[in-house]
Amino acid sequence: MKVRLNKTTWRAVSGIAASFLLVVSFQNCGKAGFDADLDSNLESSSSDAALSAKYGESTAAKVQAIPFAFDATFDTITYNSCAESQLRTSNAFFSVKAGAYTTGGVKIRDEFYAYADQNFKPIYPEPTLTENQYKQYLADSPVNNGAVPSMAVRVKNSLTDVYTTNKSVTLWSDVVPMVGTLTDSLVMDSFAQKGITANYFPFSPEQRVLEAGINFNSSEELAEEFRNIFMNSGVLSLTYMASNTEIYKLRAASDAYPVKTAYGKAYNLTFSPYAVSGGASNNPNHILSQINETDLSSPGVGSKFWNCSRRFSVIRTQDAAAYCPSHTYDQLKDPYIRAELEIARRHLRADQWDINVTNRCAVPKGGVSCYKEEAVGGAPVVEYDLTKECFRSNGSYAGAVPSSKCLHFITVCTRD
């Protein structure tokens, strides 16, 4: 289900009582539209006056014209295909988790520095603009002030529409804020220098990393529905909220509906069955096989494909000895194994998952299984042989219905 987060509608509901007298005098105005226009004009004039009082009219106009300055990017996206009702109570299980740990993070665009250096003067005796000046201009810039990076599953051609598992969009579930307000001085301390990309924000009063997760893992049917959404009308998005509470706003150059471009990144996800010689025809398409990253402000320009070669089969605890033994001490001395573990551990924590990167497998800890733990007719609970037919609740079968469940996978994709 998708829900439109619309500023006009939100304000129409909250402003009815206060605007009653105005409706009498302006009966020909649409109620929601009138409230939105009035509020927007008041906000704009108030902002103009404050900037003029602080900088003077000429410099205030230049502050008003500062371009959007932030560029946030993920470098790791993980998809977990496990989808059963019991997983909703375990924070070890997620559907999609994304974050920035090495090459990704938050930086200030070169365009902002070029604009600031050209339009503003340094404070004597400094020969150039200082870091504090850059931070102050960003905080006073209307298009940048209060920006909060967030992750959501949005409609490609209408970015203010959000796909949700409920009837309404919920903060922290459907729209997930990250880091905090980017124009907070403590947050900007991490990336206010030219050429710096930050993925850790030690002084942030909110989150210290750029990381978010979304769950649609309560059933196989719902998980498959979201995979189809990703491959058709939906996109995993990294956009910017006006603040960490106003989920109905999306920062974009234009607020005309439908919003087709915005500041931020789009991650187009493609799914397929696990590629294996002689693979069974009913193997589900729950491997995240490809990610194509694009800029939402100019779709299709500068697209970048990710590496999605790390695929971990999810093994039952009872079957771990046979299919996913723990790494030995000598194996952990291998630099390759250590490097691969470091990547996998970004989203599969050591207290929640055992991982063997050589066998490409993962075993959940904590007593919660990826699978419903009932055996049918004495058959194995999970079919680990991908050349054999397997059972999934949303599958279709020409002959006898298989007894053993389909194997699930965790795909870890990186922006190399």
Image (cartoon, grey):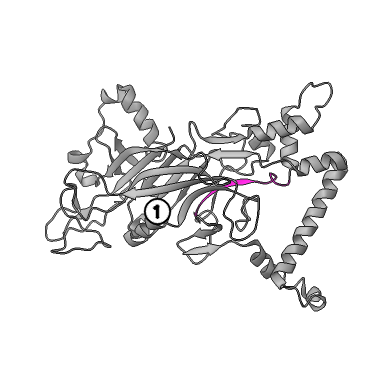
User: Is 147 within the magenta?
Assistant: yes
Question: Do we see residue 84 in this rendering?
Answer: yes
Question: What residue is disc 1 on?
Answer: 231
**What's the magenta region?**
142-154
Quarter of the image where one finds residue 128:
top right
Outermost residue to the front: 301
Q: Is residue 197 left or right of residue 47?
A: left
Query: Residue type at mark 1?
Result: Met
Assign a secondary structure to mark 1: loop
Residue 165 x/y as whole percent: 45, 62
Q: Is residue 22 left or right of residue 270?
A: right
Q: Is residue 270 left or right of residue 144?
A: left
Residue 112 x/y as whole percent: 68, 35
Residue in the picture at 26% in, 25% down: 331
Question: Do we see residue 352 in this rendering?
Answer: no
Residue in the picture at 32% in, 25% down: 336
402 vs 2, nearest the viewer: 2
